Image: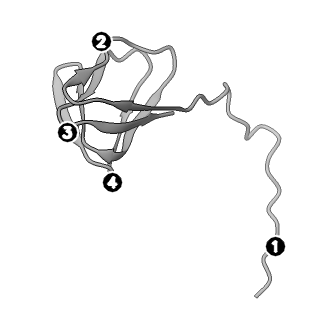
């Protein structure tokens, strides 16, 4: 089987640079409530994150992620520690 290349449309680039963040979150620590000027995806590669966003709280494992839209007030932490990642 032969794979054929696809042409990428010239306007397919992301409208803004993508920023990645990797940081361990120690036991019982949280980032203070804040918001971003761009959308954010939050996930963990190990452990469990707690995500509080505009009246709801979630616990997400390493198989899950949370989409936080631009301007959403939120905080992220971990009860037992986690390897935090975000885009």
Residue at the farthest front position? 26
> Quick check: 66 above or below 31?
below
* Residue under numbered circle 2: 32
The reply, left or right, for residue 15 in relation to residue 63 is: right
Mark 2 or 3, nearer chain start:
2
> Quick check: 84 above or below 1?
above
Residue 12 disc label: none
- Give the alpha-carbon distance from disc 2 to disc 1, as whole Å: 48 Å
* Residue under numbered circle 1: 4
Dots 4, 1 in contact, CB < 8 A = no
Colour basis: one colour
Residue drawn at 26 percent across, 20 percent down? 30
Toward which corner of the image does residue 35 lie, by quadrant?
top left
- Give the alpha-carbon distance from disc 1 to disc 3, as whole Å: 42 Å
Picture coordinates of residue 24, whole percent (x, y): 38, 33
* Residue under numbered circle 3: 59
Residue drawn at 33 percent across, 48 percent down? 46
Marks 4, 1: nearer the viewer: 4
- Give the alpha-carbon distance from disc 4 to disc 3, as whole Å: 11 Å
* Residue under numbered circle 4: 63
């Amino acid at each position: 089987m032969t794979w054929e290349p696809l042409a990428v449309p010239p306007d397919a680039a992301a409208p803004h640079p993508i920023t990645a963040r990797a940081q361990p979150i120690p036991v019982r620590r949280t980032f203070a409530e804040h918001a971003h000027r761009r959308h954010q995806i939050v996930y963990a590669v190990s452990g469990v994150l707690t995500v509080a966003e505009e009246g709801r709280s979630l616990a997400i494992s390493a198989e899950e992620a949370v989409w936080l839209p631009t301007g959403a007030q939120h905080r992220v932490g971990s009860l037992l520690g986690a390897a935090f990642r975000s885009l």
